[in-house]
Each structure stands twice: as structure tokens, then as C-alpha cells.
Image (tube, rainbow, N blue to C red):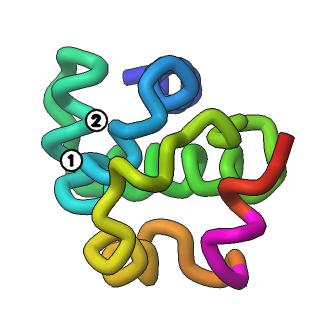
Amino acid sequence: MDVQAIIAQVSAALADAPEKLQDLVSDPKGTIEELTGQELGEGDLSQIVDGVKSGIADGSLDLSGLDLGSLDLGKLAGGLGGLLGGLGGLGGIFGRK
């Protein structure tokens, strides 16, 4: 399994449909499997989530088009601890251009 290719595929899907971020936070494995059509092992899942997280943190994954009104930010913020820990808040993530 080419983890980098899956990271690129998931990142592209999030760029095209940023509302999928909430699905990714609430069910990372299920969402990644849905987006890629591939079954994942736990080690693969961790690497993919880390790769997507890095793309969000460094700005290479542009989520500025995300309509925050369509997201349940309470649920999203609660789930971000493990997925996006250490990024210092949602404003920096979604405000990037």
C-alpha cells in the first residue's frame, strides 16, 4: 500500500469537499476507506492521518473554502485533539489562503 498516494488522494478529496473534514474527524478510518476504496490497517491509518494533519498544518491543504456554518464545530473541536493536536486552534487552520 502506497501511504503517500493515499495521503494525496485524501488531501485532494478534502480540498474538493472540505465538509468531509467532519467525517474524517468523527470516523477517520471509515472516511479514508470511503474516499480511497481501500481497507486500512491501524498502522496505515496512523500514517495517513499524520500526513493529512501535516498538510493542514503547513497550509498545503487549503481548507479556506470550508463553510464553517455547515460544520458542528463543537463535535469537530472535540475530535480534533487526536487528529490535529498541537495546531493551536481552528482559526489558524481555516483562515489560511
At label 2, the amino acid type is Ile
Label 2–label 1 contact, CB within 8 A = yes
At label 1, the amino acid type is Lys
Q: Is residue 95 left or right of residue 12?
A: right
Q: Secondary structure at mark 1?
A: helix
> To which quarter of the image does residue 39 belong?
top left
Q: Is residue 34 left or right of residue 3?
A: left
- Residue 76 colored magenta? no
Whole-percent x, y for residue 12 in the image: 54, 20
Residue 45 lies, with reference to residue 10, above or below; the image says below
The label on residue 29 is 1
Spatial separation of the CA atoms under disc 2 and disc 1 = 5 Å
What kind of secondary structure does the magenta stretch mostly adopt?
helix
Whole-percent x, y for residue 43 in the image: 33, 54
Residue plotted at (77% across, 55% down): 95
Q: Is residue 82 visible?
A: no
Question: Circle 2 is placed at which residue position?
Answer: 32
Q: Is residue 15 visible?
A: yes
Write the start and end of the magenta stretch as one range: 88-92
The residue nearer to you, when weighing 14 against 43, is 14
Whole-percent x, y for residue 85 in the image: 56, 79
